[in-house]
Amino acid sequence: MHLSRRTLLAASGATASVALTAGPAGTAWATAREEDPVDDFEGLLDRARTLLTGGVFDPADPDFAAGVAALDTTAGALWDSLDRSGGRTALWSDLSPLTDPGNFGQSYTRLRTLAVAWSTPGTALSGSAETAEALFSALRFAYDTAYHPSAPETGNWWFWEIGAPRALMDCCVLLRAHLPAADLADYLAVVDRFCPDADRRTNSPTLPETGANRTDKAVIVALRGLLGKDADKVASARDALSDVRDSGRNSLFRYTTSDDGFYEDGSFVQHSEVAYTGSYGTVLLGGAAWLLSLLAGSPWAVTDPKVSVMYEAVERSFVPVIFDGLMMDAVRGRAISRERAGDHRDGAAAVAAILLLATGAPAGPADRWRSLVKGWLTRNRTTPFTALATLPQLALAKAVLAEAGIRPAPRTTGSFVFADMDRVVHRRPGWACTLSLSSKRISAYEAGNGENLHGWYTGDGMTYLYDGDDLGQYNDGFWPTVDPYRLPGTTVDTRPRDDLGTGAGTSTYRPPNAVAGGAALDGRYAAAAMELTGAPGSSLRARKAWFLLDNTVVALGAGITSGDGRPVETVVENRNLGADGRNRLLVDGIPVRNGASGHARWAHIEGVGGYVLPGGAALRTLREKRTGTWRAIDTGADTGGSTDPVTRRYLTLWLDHGTSPDGAGYAYVLLPGASAAATAVWSASRPVRVLVNDATAQAVEDRRTGLTAVHFWAAGTAGGITASGPATVLVRRRGARVSVAVADPGRTGTSVTVGLPFAVREVAEADDTVDVTPGRRPLLTVAVGGSRGHTHRAELVQ
């Protein structure tokens, strides 16, 4: 599946934008509906139309007026450029030949935008007979020329089986009162050819559809059933959500333990090995919410009690990775290269999906979600949701903002280790830090169809630092202008790389390392590690660890070795300062522009925070203007970026390990939001100490909170804590209480024994997998085998 199409769907008022009156209106309709099945079909088609257009709204409301104006502008440009001549060979000159799947797929998407504008009061095309006739003609032309039952499925399957049929069915819903019956019959027939059901891939009938693909197809089949008054089709769409055909094996309402779908720890994976909450996951959530709302109160209403998994996913999977309405790039896969997507647009799509799902969810979670959404929307002044939303999305958002009884929730805080997708998220009140890791289980990147051409190092420990006062960091031209060889948090050699994903289809790269992940303690602290193995062509190896604390992130590296004759660097920071940013850089209190800084102990970037080098290190700095284009990182058929140059200023801090290092290391500390004075004080007082940093263990001690955290690469001792083998261990003493968290992120052992350096009298509580032997030298034996790297916990009493 080609995720960019999700952006197109959202932009045209489809998958992610169906959020208006499905809840209350659906209930009212269900109460009044007749028992005649025809009335069921017509009532649901009316509801689908409302969900696509936004229904009735106040045209005097400035937000709705702006939404109508935006739709009018987009549709007006498409209308003016639509070839309506008798001798046309394509509908739009830039989408020729029409027989190319990408071109007819995008043509249907544009036709849907025109149909939405025709159906929306207040636009220039609203209700126009000329527009309706042009749409009928264009749909017939596309059918006759390119997309018909006898056409062979070539190129990207997604256009044939999801992109084109969804847009076509939406057009039919909007135009159905005037659409010739013979045309509708043909369009239903082409959908029957390329998307006959939601359970299987049409071009590969033995391949079951999973995740977002299954959701998309379920929506298409439901609309086809309603338009064709085929009750069995509608029922099959509903049943596909639960995968009745295969006894729930690919149900969207279940937690998976492998391959695609939602995991109980909050992970979401698509394409078997890609962390994809922010794009495919959002599509799945939005599509499921759409169908739940569409069918509510009808004979085909979803009654599977396991739909609760979808409700739980909002808070387990989505809330941790949404920051003030932005979707974290670490879970957007190759979508990071799409100029017309961005963290703000994928975030808005997720917000819209959550609001839509809330219309039919139980009151408790629905109220929590609306409170969270209100907090996101009121804090985000950089990319306001109202400026991104379609009319249906806008209606639900404005209802939440206007309801005095809904209090905006504060920012989510806590530590989240998503073991099943190699991601770690640490959130504090003013900032968040996200780690993008990879292993032999989860890919370092996905590229293909011309997308994500420079994503080489995005899964090598890239460290995203989100600042509540700088929501544009990764959205303001970051990806086309950042140096892709110097992504924050990564350790890389400096060899030139070829573009990724220039051919057809998508591909991933999974490195051979086992260790990627960590453990979380008390939902407040985390430790993570990754064994870095260079991509093919590089002998680089490194052992990297991160310790995520109250106001501090400590990053350690050890065993950095390479024999390729190339310099190796660890990137501390590569901050996008915007088009005109000239943020002051201090190194040990002295303003610095570029070059080596000698033996530095700390640095500070104005408006960002502090960076401490425990024990001192030779810090390299670079202030530069970088110019790039979106086209240079994305040449996709329907996602290809602009060739217009984009220029941004950057401040880069890095540590140079020299050419072909042997056992090199590093240690640096991030102090997000800290002042220069606070950074200097932290550097001098060292409230967090690095206990050990070598190939056996990496450990820190936070004396303020009583926390010691260690990642053991092998059996050893650190900070008085012992481990019988590889493990991540966090221990916190608070008075007489001791909290312990243990994980095996490499998933290599069956059990690990952890020894503590102080006496323990008794066990207050412990997971079933943890066996505690109290005493002067207590031991915890943790059954880590089969736990897929998840955290095991115990509460002890001294």
Image (cartoon, grey):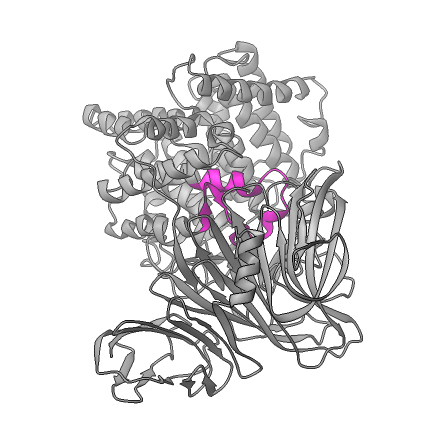
Query: At 53% from the left edge and 39% from the top edge, which residue is drawn?
Result: 344
Q: Nearer the viewer, residue 760 or 349?
A: 760
Q: Is residue 701 left or right of residue 624?
A: left
Considering only vertical position in the picture, is 537 above or below 718? Answer: above
Q: Nearer the viewer, residue 100 or 790?
A: 790
Q: Quadrant of the C terminus?
A: bottom left
Q: Where residue 171 sits in the image (x, y, percent)? A: 49, 27
Q: Where residue 110 sits in the image (x, y, percent)? A: 58, 28
Considering only vertical position in the picture, is 64 above or below 366? Answer: above
Q: Where residue 161 sits in the image (x, y, percent)? A: 52, 44
Judged from this view, the residue extending furthest toward the top is 129
Q: Nearer the viewer, residue 408 or 175?
A: 408
Q: Name the dominant secondary structure of the magenta segment.
A: helix
317 within the magenta span: no
User: Looking at the rendering, which quadrant does residue 96 occupy?
Assistant: top right
What range is drawn magenta here? 321-350
User: Looking at the rendering, which quadrant does residue 539 occupy?
Assistant: bottom right
Q: Where residue 100 sits in the image (x, y, percent)? A: 67, 39
Q: Nearer the viewer, residue 515 or 502?
A: 515
Query: At 46% from the left edge and 46% from the top edge, which residue is drawn?
Result: 323
Q: Is residue 24 left or right of residue 201?
A: left
Query: At 45% from the left edge and 70% from the top edge, which residue is drawn?
Result: 518
Residue 459 showing in the rendered view? no
